[in-house]
Image (cartoon, grey):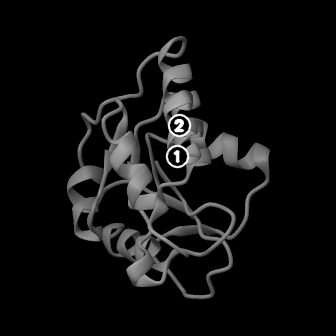
Amino acid sequence: MIFATVGTQLPYPRLIRALDRLATEIDEPIIAQTGPDPRPYPNLDLRLYLTPSAFRALVSEARLIVAHAGIGTILTARDFGKPLVLLPRRHAEGEHRNDHQMATAREVVRHPGIHVAWEASDLARLLTRRDLSLPGPGGTSRPQLVQRIRDFIDN
């Protein structure tokens, strides 16, 4: 199962539309947490909102997480040892107030287990791969990631 999440602040129609189209081409269910998005996505199992425990349960069950480039989702995927595919929100598309998600994706793409779809058309190639790298082990690598994110936010 693939679990997609858009975070808690804004809907993300570009990501969810792309996943809805892909759902007919891949042999795997996609559950998507969409937030307040009124559009129909007939090929996805939609969840507008999730409790923290329901969110963790879906992350735990998923083979792969697909999301915007939100720090909380990045850290959650790493905590659960799940490969993560990011499609960063873009300011030019009206998806966020600035391009901080593009900057975040450029920084975290070098870490094992994080794969970036720079365009929605890149999603098909990434979602059908069964050999996506997994996040590195906990311990020293997580504090390094957290410190890099802190440094990035502070600067």
Residue carrying label 1: 155
Is residue 109 depicted above or below 90 in this figure? above
Give the residue drawn at x 53%, y 16%.
Answer: 138
Is residue 80 depicted above or below 105 in this figure? above
Give the residue drawn at x 67%, y 41%.
Answer: 57
Q: Mark on residue 151? A: 2
Residues marked 2 and 1 touching at CB (< 8 Å) = yes
Q: Nearer the viewer, residue 91 or 152?
A: 152
**Quarter-wise, where is residue 56 in the image?**
top right
Residue 100: horizontal and vertical position, in percent?
Answer: 48, 61
Give the residue drawn at x 55%, y 28%.
Answer: 147
Q: Residues within 10 Å of mark 1 (few under 14, many from 20)?
A: few
Residue 140: horizontal and vertical position, in percent?
Answer: 51, 12
Residue lying farthest to the top in this orientation: 139
Element at label 2: helix
Q: Residues within 10 Å of mark 2 (few under 14, many from 20)?
A: few
Q: Nearer the viewer, residue 1 or 76?
A: 76
